[in-house]
Amino acid sequence: MSLLQKALESGEFAVTAELAPPKGTDFSHALQNAELFGDRVHAINVTDFQSSSLKATSLAMCKALIDLGLEPVFQITGRDRNRIAIQGEMLSAGFFGVKNLLALTGDHTTVGDNPGAKPVYDLDSIGILQAATMLASGVDMGGNKLEGSPSFFLGASVTPEYDPIELQLIKMKKKIIAGAKFFQTQAVYDIRTMEKFKEITKHLNTKILVGIIPLKSAGMARFMNKKIPGINVPDELIDRLKLSKDPVQEGIKIAGEFIVELKNRNLCDGVHIMAIGAEENVPLILDAAEL
């Protein structure tokens, strides 16, 4: 059983953070950031060609984290591989000792840095969860018997700030049936969103980690509101950033305050921090959240 699974199943407030593999073979900076997280997080998500951009593979970074004594969450998308390759990656992850997996469908290749790449989408996030569940039972998706099976604590994504939210609930239920035990959300900034989301998901047998992206400026907040579906930064937070002499530190403070309120009001089971290129700030956010 993974540390993340133990934390969530015991009722402990879980903390995960996100890390991207490098665009190249030098892992040193990414691993230095991972060591900064240390034992302050239960697990570290490793992105899989995030935003459809070429990086080293998630599995390679997961293995490097395990070698450091850290626990990874292996992210895998359906965009770049067919079901043979996806299952092969899962088998390899099982061999390396990876215990957590997050299934994603993946952004289209046209938004990335190799827009001419052909997308695959043989399996979406639900199909990936179903594949992982089948592998754990000892057979592959073709019904062929395995010599040793991987077993993952399975997760998926959800967007609480979505209209109509009913579509997200339908997908959540399908993902839970397919094997998902926890969900990490898109970034949330409005406590009212989580109040509503907690109420409409209270009947679901799952754990929810709220996504936290620290804001760096008022401009970043406005850009996210305009360009990223499912994100809504309230005007009062934008005003705080605009008036601050140090917007980065203000963004860290905002994130910490939000986490404290989420935890104290029992609106989620944990948080997932996505610092997006500023991973050195993750410990500062945890300090601000008193975690």
Image (spheres, rainbow, N blue to C red):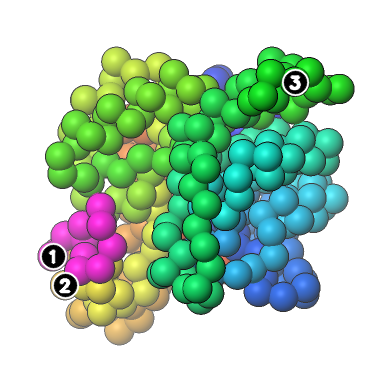
Q: Which mark is residue 144?
A: 3
Which comes sooner in the sequence, label 1 or label 3? 3
Q: Where 91 sits versus 258, above or below? A: above
- For residue 152, which quarter of the picture? top right
SS at mark 1? helix
Instruction: Name the residue: 42% across, 69% down.
Output: 110
As measured in the structure, the alpha-carbon distance from the residue carrying label 3 to the one carrying label 2 is 58 Å
229 magenta-colored: yes
SS at mark 2? helix
As measured in the structure, the alpha-carbon distance from the residue carrying label 1 to the one carrying label 2 is 6 Å
As measured in the structure, the alpha-carbon distance from the residue carrying label 1 to the one carrying label 3 is 55 Å
Q: Amino acid at mark 2?
A: Asp
Q: Amino acid at mark 1?
A: Asp
Magenta stretch, residue numbers: 225-236
Q: Where 39 sits versus 180, above or below? A: below
Instruction: Name the residue: 16% across, 72% down.
Output: 239
| Residue 74, horizontal then vertical, whole percent | 64, 45
- For residue 165, which quarter of the picture? top left
Instruction: Name the residue: 20% across, 69% down.
Output: 226
For the residue pair 134 and 226, the one nearer the viewer reads as 134
**Which residue is under mark 1?**
235
Q: Which mark is residue 239?
A: 2
- CB of mark 1 within 8 Å of CB of mark 2? yes
Single out the mark in the foreground, 1 or 3: 3
